[in-house]
Every structure is written in C-alpha cells, then in structure tokens.
Amino acid sequence: MNKFNKFAVIILLLCGIFSFASITQATDIVPGSALEKEMKEMVQQGILSGYKDGTYKPTASVTREQFAAFINRALNLPAGTHPFKDVPKNSSLSNEIGAAYSAGLMVGVSESMFRPTANITREQMAQTLKNVIEYQEMDLKEKRIEFSDAADFNSSGGIRAVFAIVHYEITEGIPDGKNGLKFGPKDIASREQAAAFIYRFLLAHEKASAPPILPDVPNDNSLYYLGYVDNGQLVKQQYGHKEYQQAAESFKSVATAKVIFKGDEIIRIKSGLAFGDRVSGSGAKEVTTIYFDSNFTKQATYVEHGREILYIDANAEFVKVQVGGTIGYAKHSEVDFVPSELISNRDYYLKNKWSTLEHYQYNYVSKSGSSHSIGPAPAEMAEGVKYYSKDGVHFANEAGATQFVHYPYFQYQSVRTKTNYTAEELDQFLMNRLTAVSSSSGTYKDATTKSKLIGKGKYFIEIQNKYNVNALFILAAAMHESAYGMSTNAQTKNNLFGIRVYDGSPHEGTTYSNPEASIDAFAREYMNRNYANPLGGYANGASPGNKTTGFNVSYASDPTWGAKVAGHMFRTDLELGKKDIGQHQLGITNTASTNVRNAPNGSTILYQFKRADLGVNNAFGYPVVILGEQKANDGYIWYKVISDLNPEADTNNGIGWIRSDLVDLIK
C-alpha cells in the first residue's frame, strides 16, 4: 500500500478503477493552465474520457448527462433507474443518469424530463456536489461568502449549496474585477471546471474519512492505557497499567475514558462498533472467525474483512460480538473498533420511494459504501427513515429500540420449492438485464454476447427437476457470484458460483469444462451434498438465510450474501410478473433439535434439525415451507412441510411433518 500515494489510493477505492488511461496524446490540455492538474488527474482515473481524435476539450461545455456520468464514475454508484421520458433507454448514458437519480444526486427539470443534452450550469453543478456530500455522509457545513452576483442564483438552496462546497474547499469563487468574488451561477460549466470540482471533492472526502491520529506517547506494548476522544481524535493517556484488571477498573470509573489500549491496539470500548480486520502474514485480507465459545474451539461463522459487527463487550482475552443473529466471540487480532463518538458511517436500511427494502452497507477498512435491494419493504417502515439491523430481521430505530420484525420472503424461502417461470422467461429476464448493464465499460462490456449465463434457462430448469433445487435461486446465485456471467472466474474457468474462491485468494477457484458443469456441481455437490441437505456437513437450513441460518452461515464471508441473492430473485420475479413471491406460507423452527416425521405424530423420524443455537430471541431456527396442517391423535396440530432431503434420499414423496408449536409462522 505504501507504494501508492494517498490520493491515488482513495481514487482507486472510490472508483473501482485499476487501469490508468493514457493522456500522452492530450494535446489540448494546456501545460501551466489553471486547472491542468485537476483535469489530468480526472482523465487519468477514467472519470473524464477523451474524444476519438485524442483531445479532451477542457474548455468545452458539460451537459447534464455527462456530469451524471462523471459523478457515477467517481463514486461507483449502484445501478439505478429513472422516470425520464426524454432519456432513451438505449442511450449510452441512460444508466449513468439512472444511477445518479436513484442515489438522489441529480433530479430532472420536471418529474418526467431530465434534459440530458442541456448544458449544466455552475449552480446546478454545486447543488449536485452538495448532494454528493450528503450521500457520502460527510458533515454538511457552510462557509458563507459575499458573492457580488448573489442575486443571480435561482434559489436560496442554490447559494447554500455553494456555501457547503466552499466549506470543503471545492471552490472559492471567481474574482469579479471589483476586489470581490462572484460565482457565476448561470454560467455554463466547462469540462475542466467539472474535473476540478470532483477532484477537490475527492480530496475533501479522503480528509474527512481519514482515521484519527494518535499523538506520540511513550509506548510499552505490555501495558494497558486508557484512551479519550478529544476534538474528534483518540488520545492515549501517558500512564500505562501493568495489569488489565487495573485498567478495567479505571475504565469503569472514569466517565471520559472511551477505550482501553494494549500498547497501540484498542482492545475494549465503552460503546460503538467492531469490524473485521484480520490480515495474513503476507498482508492479504482474511475473514474474521466468530466462535461459539470464548476459548475459540467451536466455529460459528465468519465475516468479510472490513464489515460491521455488533460490539457487545470485551476483555483482555476476547471480544464478544453479534454477527447475524449469532452471539459469539472473536480474537482481538481479527477485529478493530470505532467508539460511538467517532462513528461517521455505518450500515442502515431504508424503504425507498418504490417501497423496496434497501440495505446500505459500509466497509470500515476501504472506507467505501454500497447498497442493494432485498425485496418489498414491510408496511411498518416509514419511507426515507433510517433503520438499523444486525441480522436483517429485527429492525431498530436510531435509539436502538426494536420497531418490527421482518423476514424477507426470498431470503427464507426453501430452495426445495420450484419456480413458476419457464426457461424462456428466465432467459428473457437475463437478456434484459445484460442489455441494461452492457453499455457500461469494464466488467460488463459486451455482456449481451459474452456472458456465460446466456441461454442457460433450459439447463436451470433441468437441474431444478433433477436435483430439486429451485431454478430461480440457482440463477440468482449465479448472477450474484459471477457478475452476470462476466467475472474473470466465469469467463476463464466457467466458474459461475465462486466455488473455491476465497477472500485471501480471489484469483483461485475451480475450473469447469463448460458453464453447465459448474451449474451441475453447485446443485449436486454443494446444495444437495452439504448445504440444503439436513444431513450435510454445512447444514443450516435450505434457504439463502443470514449468518445464523441458511447457506450464508458457511457459504460466503459477506454477511449479506443471502440478502443479496434474495434481491436478485426479487428483481427477476418483479420483472417477470411476481409469480413466485408469497406463493408459500413460510415458517421457522423455534426449538433446538426439531424432528421432521413421516406423518402427523408419525413413528419414523425422516431427519432432524440438529443445531442447538437458534440465535437471538430463538429467531433463527430452520426455515420451512408449510403446505397444510392436520390434527393428530396426540392432540397437536401438525404442519405438512416440504422435505429438505435430497431426491435420492427422500422416501416420503417430498414431504414431512412438524408439530406446529415447534414452528413460528413468518408473516
């Protein structure tokens, strides 16, 4: 990392761009011009692209659609849609406008019109940058300047947006020739001005995201020190305790103490959050392992590097945390902390204007965020209000009080169900999606002809019928793991599911002779042998799930893998007519070691859900699909459920029976 300068690193992290554009032919970027440095930096990072003749036209005007593209490339925004009638869907910049609009960074001139080819004014550019500041959750502060052309602004919101970007030194104004400053709000922005504004924003974001700097304090790595928050920085006390217990007693009695250090490492905080921070001896990012016990002998699950973990408590030996619905223990060497007073970004959920549940996640190591949709938002959610959840099911307000419980349908639907869609419909959706993403550069370039998923709908259905694994789920998992069939592993190894691709060695992975072999292996070897099979080595329930139940426990380090796969299923189902969502009554077992029998109160146990730990509130047993109910001679109501057993092991026509008091219905 030290081989890159800090500015290059932040650009790489924000933009996801790892190859540099050559600007050796940019003869029209004038050496020594006022904005030469800013223009060249943005060109080199791929945020501004050149023309076919090798020029970059720094003084040319910028259109509204071009500025949307610049912002999208700078922030690597999640894909989005827009409602504008004057932006053709096949336009090369339609996706860029959709991303900027969905993120709330740019709006139209009306509800249905964007005026994509109209030149953007400096005032409009400032308003967009102000929205970007809010989107990145930076403090929205103002530095007021007396502009001589203040009367030229269209609204007070426009001039306040300028005050916000002035605060972050994105602009200072322009000399007005009368010993004052003007802004030129109605002036058309040039390409070099746009480059300068974005370049300076990225510098400001880097500065705002920089970790606290500890002052030089004589250090002994064997001693324990208290730490305080002073002016937005962690300050370590001069005096060190020889014993942890002495430091812990002082920590408890001193209200201003916020952390305990051992040497330079934070090992305990009063409140705040933790995140995965394990690295190998070679410096590679590794997963953080969560154990059921404080002696680190029984693994519960594991979490991706940099991802948020609910902090509960800590001592000198371990950190007590919650991941998904699992409360467990992590090693100090594998986690880091952010005290409450220094939290500037965190994970949260929103109900958007389309009534979709959106999850905004943040990586505390890379200092970058992203979002993904999961499914229909619950009625209890208020639109645009932030909610917080560590398990994706129990949602709390900012004060931490639980507001409602919501199990997203596709995240907890058993993969032993069958989709209602035909092979042709699955292929139709995929091609529509590939068309939407193929206009972008990089990973998705030429996706409509190169994706390894093209035309595989028939095979997904064949595999569903052969192995009893839902075809829509298989397609969703493939889209997620292989970037719609365009990832390097998909293209070079026909590996559509990230099989044997690990966090510390993403270049590795199993090679298959063709994509069909990968699909077959995923269903046969992984789902049926280990994950969806209640007798398998990684059996935690036959649904995508989270970090406590379902495949997500052991299949992926990303704690939101199950929710993301469910999101792909939801979007596919939504476009194709909503034939799958809500088709079954779902339930989740609430008792450890639940037996599934051959009949109501039957004498034969088909299989058993063996796990003893059902997570917080016993809310994460095993998902089941309920087909009906019947009262038995023991006086209990019994639920008829879809069997989790593999087809070759099933002896009961694909069904089982569970006593109803052992199952909670998912509403």
Image (cartoon, rainbow, N blue to C red):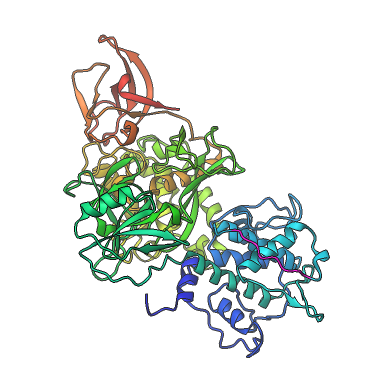
Closer to us: 486 or 67: 67
The total number of labels drawn is: 0
- When asked about the image quadrant of residue 472, the answer is top left
Q: Is residue 425 above or below residue 287?
A: above
x%, y% of residue 465?
35, 39
Q: Is residue 296 visible?
A: yes
Q: Residue at point 18% right, 46% down?
A: 298
Q: Is residue 213 above or below residue 527?
A: below
Q: Is residue 602 above or below residue 161?
A: above
What quarter of the picture does the C terminus occupy? top left
x%, y% of residue 435?
56, 57
Q: Is residue 158 above or below residue 361?
A: below
* Magenta stretch contains residue 141: yes
Prevailing SS of the magenta stretch: loop
Extent of the magenta region: 140-147
- Position of 550 with respect to 201 (left or right) is left
- Position of 135 with respect to 122 (left or right) is left
Closer to us: 159 or 72: 159
x%, y% of residue 283?
29, 69
What quarter of the picture does the N terminus occupy? bottom left
Q: Is residue 459 visible?
A: no
Closer to us: 507 or 333: 333
Q: Residue at point 48% right, 31% down?
A: 582
